[in-house]
Image (cartoon, rainbow, N blue to C red):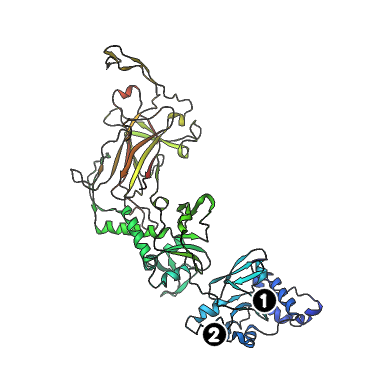
Amino acid sequence: MAIFARIHIMNLKMNSHMKTIYKQLPRFLFIAAVAGLTCHACQDAEWDDHYSASGSTATASLIELLRSHSEFSNFMTLLEQTGGDSILAYDQTFTVFAPTNDALAEFGATEGAMTEVVKNHVARYLYGSSNLVDTTYLRVKMLNGKYQELTREGSEICFAGIPLPSNPLIATNGIIYALNKKAQYYGNLWEILANGTGRYDSLYHYIAAFNDTTTTKSAVEVGENNRGQKLYFHNQWMKKYGAINLEDSLYTAFLPTNEGWNVAYAAISPYFRTFGSLIEDRTPTSSFNYRRSYETDTPVSDSLQDIHTRETIARDILFRRRPDFMTPAGDTLMTTSGDTYHHPAYLVEGLTPQTASNGQYYSVDRLPHHADDLFLKTIKIEAEKSAGREFLYATLTNRSAAEGNLRDSVSNMQFLEVVNTSTNNLTPPQVVFNVPNVLAAKYNIYAVFVPAQAFDTLAVGYRQPDTIVCRRDTVINRIQYHAGDEAVIKYPYYDADSTKVCFYLSYVHEQPNSSGYNMYRDDKIESDPDTGEYFITKGYETTTFLVARNFQFPFANYSGSAFAEKDVQAVNTKICVATNLTNADKRTMGYNMRIDYLILEPVIE
């Protein structure tokens, strides 16, 4: 087996050179009961290798062997000074990766000796070549809780990158490998942030602000409360994005230095410029003509901007394990937040990874954030979703396109049908949609409509009108034409399926209007900003309208924080969709709208 080295206790062979082992079987059975059986039968091979190499059973303990070999005297001194010798006297099985005197020549007995040297070179159970029969890599948990790597390249076995001798010393309670170098002690990612001599203070203090204790059991116990209940370390950021304080998971991190944090803050902060508290709301009842006033450039708005900016910087610094940045599947990599980097090779260009005990990290003075990958995202509003949706002078029905002719082109195979309840041009059917998580950025805004055939396969589609060219001034169907005009002599039929629509944008503006309100509705948008054509839906196919190009929202209206209370800021960015029919239009068009979705695509500059 390739997970743990195997200890041969219960299956000792009765051959000629193993009879001495049989005489000592009671002692071995005791060791097996304490330690060997916890590894199941997985350590047979390692013991077999050792005994066949020596030709006889071991008679000395780990401590006795270390004392009897002068090349380990410095390590033995550290064991005695730190109490490590008493640990190796336990009735357990250990693998000791013992640094020689030369390896410890420059290391003195310090306060960190127990953790950084003694416990960093001792592991419970047996490890060796048999662990790497079916793999080339194994993480070995040391007594200090850290993990070191046991690797194989060809016939060479290495511990922490240090070649292991092929003839280890065999003890009654374990194995000793002589190391010609001291294994490097690595902090985990959290320790690196905390002990980075101030290099990562900005990131550290942001994450540390989430530190707390809980009575819910977790990996790190920190004490007791006044009721005698055990308390455990809890950090909401680590729970959400990755437990970088623990040793049993692997992460790859991009750690911004203080300079890197400040550069990222300056670049990201403007996107989260926001408004503050509501001052006044005079919006008429049953109206979408908003009249609200909000504070701007206040401590509240500044605080929200700061919260969202710092969260955004820290949200996408972690990947699980050690991803392949150069040739990942699909040429994308997902961070622990769920955000995706596209073409991620650029992330590590010119960078060298550094080792942590629970992974690796890149120390960066410039975070490789691409706004459109991570936070400046496309916003899609499915019209059939009722949350944040309001309407007037209409009845709303969610329709399924699953059985229609356009099932493959209708988003989620569902859309919203809006049927008028009034034929008065002053009270057209209209629907208002909340636009969540808008940033202070530019967007191209689109709206997509579907015809009746999306759910009714018998619906009749649009037909071009029949026309003639007038030879003289004339009136046809009560419409005045002049000589040379193209006159409609037979109107197309739409089956009340095609209609003319318009849009209104409401949001918090930079400056108040003449009434003193800064959250109000802009003028009607009734034609394509590029072509000037009216927005007329087609009776036979899906219609996509460009509502606005490069539209700049002056303030973010953002509530996408993973930690803030829900609805900390109400949605004040809204798009109203309404019919826009004149009396002449009513001859050829109906009032019904069939809205698939609205979409806001960020403009990357």
The answer to whether any part of residue 434 appears in the image is no
State the SS at label 1: helix
User: Where does residue 310 sit, x and y in percent of width and height?
Assistant: 36, 60
> Which amino acid type is marked by label 2?
Leu
Residue 272 in the image: above or below residue 258: above
Residue reaching furthest to the right: 16
User: Where does residue 392 sit, x and y in percent of width and height?
Assistant: 31, 36
Q: Which residue is mark 2?
A: 78
Please tell me how many numbered marks the rendered image carries.
2
The image's mark for residue 33 is 1
- 397 on left or right of 27: left
- Identify the mark nearer the N-term, 2 or 1: 1
Q: Nearer the viewer, mark 2 or mark 1?
A: 2
- 564 on left or right of 215: left
Residue for point 60% across, 84% down: 72
Tag 2 near tag 1, CB within 8 Å = no
Q: Quadrant of the N terminus?
A: bottom right
User: Where does residue 588 sit, x and y in percent of width and height?
Assistant: 35, 22
Q: How many residues crowd mark 1 within 10 Å: few (<14), some (14–19), many (20+)?
A: few
Q: Alpha carbon of mark 2 to alpha carbon of mark 1: how far? A: 30 Å
> Which amino acid type is marked by label 1?
Ala
Residue 55 in the image: above or below residue 471: below
Q: How many residues crowd mark 2 within 10 Å: few (<14), some (14–19), many (20+)?
A: some
Which quadrant holds residue 505?
top left
Residue for point 28% across, 48% down: 554
Residue for point 47% across, 40% down: 412
State the SS at label 2: helix
Residue reaching furthest to the top: 471
The image's mark for residue 229 is none
The answer to whether any part of residue 322 appears in the image is yes
Residue for point 48% across, 80% down: 112
User: Where does residue 39 sit, x and y in percent of width and height?
Assistant: 65, 71
